[in-house]
Amino acid sequence: MSGPCSKHQGFDPGCGLCTAVAETYLHNWSVGSDDWDGWTAPECLPRHLQGEVYGHPGFEDGSTITTSQILSTDWEKKRIVTRSRVYQLVGPPLPAFREWVEKNSPELLKNIL
């Protein structure tokens, strides 16, 4: 089973369906956004994950991918729901991403570690 829980259209940590779908893992991950158009507020841009994927049926293990748009996050369990599937984040983020967060949004650092 892949993708967000059909019951919640997102991730609910108390739902057995939601917690069963995280079979795809990302290592050396980061969060990015689409190219800025000059008009849209940066916080409104769709976000996605990038990283080395393992357990994805469409990619060889260790391939670097960019996911579909992030729909919801559970930072405590390190599970991210995108339009196409649920990803389990494994290990710390990509060092360059961590440095960017430390410099630009230090209050978010506790969420991603």
Image (cartoon, rainbow, N blue to C red):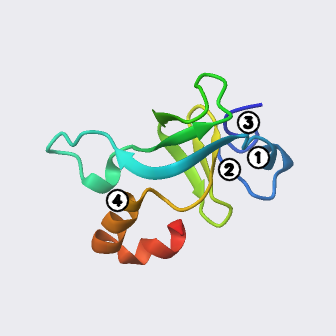
**The furthest residue to the front:** 62
Dot 3 amino acid type: Ser
Q: CA distance from mark 1 to mark 2?
A: 6 Å
Residue carrying label 4: 96
Dot 2 amino acid type: Phe
Residue carrying label 3: 6
Name the side, left or right, on which 39 lies relative to 21.
Answer: left
**The furthest residue to the left:** 38
> Mark 1 near mark 3, Cβ–Cβ under 8 Å?
no
Residue 95 appears in the figure: yes
Which residue is depicted at the point 57% across and 38% down? 53
Residue 68 appears in the figure: no
Q: CA distance from mark 1 to mark 3?
A: 9 Å
Label 2: element kind:
loop
Label 4: element kind:
helix
Label 3: element kind:
loop
Of the pair 87 and 7, the residue shown nearer to us: 87
Image position of 35 with respect to 78: above or below: above
Residue 39 image offset from top left, x and y in percent = 16, 45
